[in-house]
Image (spheres, rainbow, N blue to C red):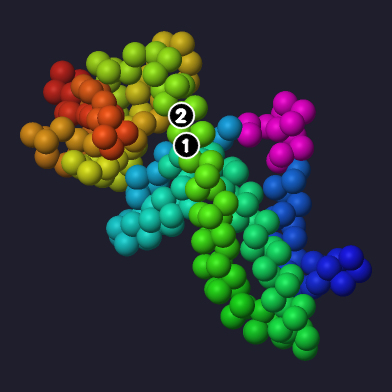
Amino acid sequence: MKEIWEQALLAYNLPLTILLGLVFLFWIFSLIGLGDADAKVEIDGSIDADADGDVDADGVFGFLMRLVNAQDVPVMLVLSLLTLFMWAVAISSNYYFNPGQSSGLAFVFLFGNFILSVFMVRLATQPLRPFFHSIKNDKEHQEPLIGSSGVVKSRVLDRDFGQCEVGRPKGAPALLNCRLAEEDKPLVRGDQILIIGFDDVNQKFIAKTDKLNVK
């Protein structure tokens, strides 16, 4: 235990130690009702990123989020597991393979640590996907969303994937995984859409251009 504590407080491990502490605080606050343990984001490969020229970054980030099953499992759970695994791998790798406490070597380990931890998160969350997916579908279908109008929230909405936000009379706006109707051209963030159906095969809502609300 003493060795773990000493490793945790080393300069190159301390950021992950602090982050892990914040994660524990979040879950403690969630348990006593001060946080939102159900926080999640439906990922489509282009999460809100406002910087210009971010096409490649959007794609890579979206791919990573899908890789760790963040489209079904709550994002805070995914991030918590990723933080825990990265911290554990960092402590172990530096303890056994960095006895000289080289910051440069620890930085090199960090890249492999991230890749390994991503796959560990994927393995850990894979069995949870059906459970959270069913919960998400139940919540989405508590109120009729087909026929609702909204806006595109992702960078692009095309025939394969996208993210749209529609209003709900009885609660907060719903953030939905969508695909565009076959006859429509790709839309961009801020375009008005209308939900016209649900694709049971791909588990996505079908959206089309809302011509009545186009400015």
Highlighted range, magenta: 26-37
Look at 14% across and 23% down and name the residue there.
Answer: 211
Can you tell which quarter of the image residue 34 is in?
top right
The residue sitting at 46% across, 29% down in the picture is 134
Numbered badge on residue 134: 2
Can residue 49 be seen?
Answer: no
Q: Quadrant of the N terminus?
A: bottom right
Which residue is situated farthest in the bottom direction here?
A: 100
Q: Position of residue 57 (x, y in %)?
A: 37, 60
Please say whether residue 106 is one of the residues in the magenta stretch: no
According to the picture, the residue beneath numbered tag 1 turns out to be 130
Q: In the image, what residue occupies the spot 46% across and 21% down?
A: 139
Image point 58% across, 32% down: which residue? 38
Q: Is residue 201 left or right of residue 128?
A: left
Counting from the top left corner in percent of width and height, residue 77 is at: 60, 44
Per the image, is 30 magenta?
A: yes
**Labelled disc at residue 20:** none
Extreme-front residue of the structure: 127
Q: Position of residue 80 (x, y in %)?
A: 64, 49
SS at mark 1? helix
Disc 2 + disc 1, Cβ < 8 Å:
yes
State left or right for residue 54 relative to residue 3. Answer: left
Looking at the rendered structure, the kind of residue marked 1 is Pro
Classify mark 2: helix, strand or loop. Answer: helix
Q: Residues within 10 Å of mark 2 (few under 14, many from 20)?
A: few
In the depicted view, which residue is nearer to us: 111 or 149?
A: 111
Which quarter of the figure is the C terminus placed in?
top left
Residue 76 vertical position relative to residue 135 in the rendered view, above or below:
below
The image quarter in which residue 39 lies: top right
Give the residue type at disc 2: Ser
Q: Is residue 126 left or right of residue 99?
A: left
Asked if residue 125 is positioned above or below residue 29 in the image, the reply reads below
